[in-house]
Image (cartoon, helix red, strand yellow):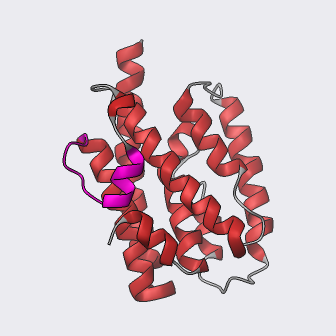
Amino acid sequence: MSLEELIAQADERGLAVSGVACLDRCVPLLGGDDEALRPLWGTLAGGPSDGDWSEVLQQTREKLDAAGEAAGGGADEAAELARGMLATAPLDRSGTALRQWADGCSAGALRIHLLLDGGGDAEAIDLTAARREGRTDGLSPLLAAELRRQTAVLELVAAHGAAALRSALEVSTEGRRVLRAAVSRRSRRDA
């Protein structure tokens, strides 16, 4: 099943996990540490009416906004996309806004990985087709791996519900390390 189909069929927990996982992998662009989204992950074990989500989301935004300012708040496109993912997270963890956010996070995270790859013509890659078809041939290793991670997170939650949160977090943690290394390489290259 393609990434686009998985997002279309995901329940509210799956959508929230998908969005948080994409954001979690992009935390290095926001100046956050590896634990920055841990409280937000913690709210995903409860049902969609879990009142902690909005409060923890607000706290997370404040923490990452402060971390971004302290780190110099880069103004490149990748950092802007990551900030947009955080800023557009809905305070209500249900409904159409959640689906739109998860879909936007998916597209944004793929675009970020494409930009950080630095190889080839980023404009020549059709991310919409990659999401729709689920194929990774012709994609850079960094981008292909992100597409596989997004798919894996959605499949895990669809198959196992809340019991899959630990596995989804592990997938995101690995992706965050990879993205952090890509950001570091780009910094050295551009220095």
- Residue 154: x percent and y percent? 43, 72
Quarter occupied by residue 167:
bottom left
Farthest-out residue, left = 137
- Residue 64: x percent and y percent? 68, 45
Q: Please state the extent of the stretch shown in magenta in the rendering.
A: 127-140
The residue positioned 42% from the left and 70% from the top of the image is: 5
- Report whether residue 86 is seen: yes
Which is more toward the observer, 153 or 37? 153
The residue positioned 57% from the left and 34% from the top of the image is: 79
- Residue 102: x percent and y percent? 57, 62
The residue positioned 31% from the left and 59% from the top of the image is: 133
Q: Is residue 7 left or right of residue 190?
A: right
Which is more toward the observer, 184 or 75? 75
Is 40 part of what is drawn in magenta?
Answer: no
Name above or below for residue 12 compared with residue 21.
below
Q: Is residue 131 left or right of residue 136?
A: right
Which is more toward the observer, 176 or 80? 80
- Residue 191: x percent and y percent? 42, 12
Name above or below for residue 141 compared with residue 43.
above
- Report whether residue 35 is seen: no
Name above or below for residue 82 compared with residue 156.
above
Name above or below for residue 105 compared with residue 32.
below
Is 129 part of what is drawn in magenta?
Answer: yes
Rendered-image quadrant of the N terminus: bottom left
Quarter occupied by residue 157:
bottom left
The residue positioned 71% from the left and 55% from the top of the image is: 60
Total marks placed? 0
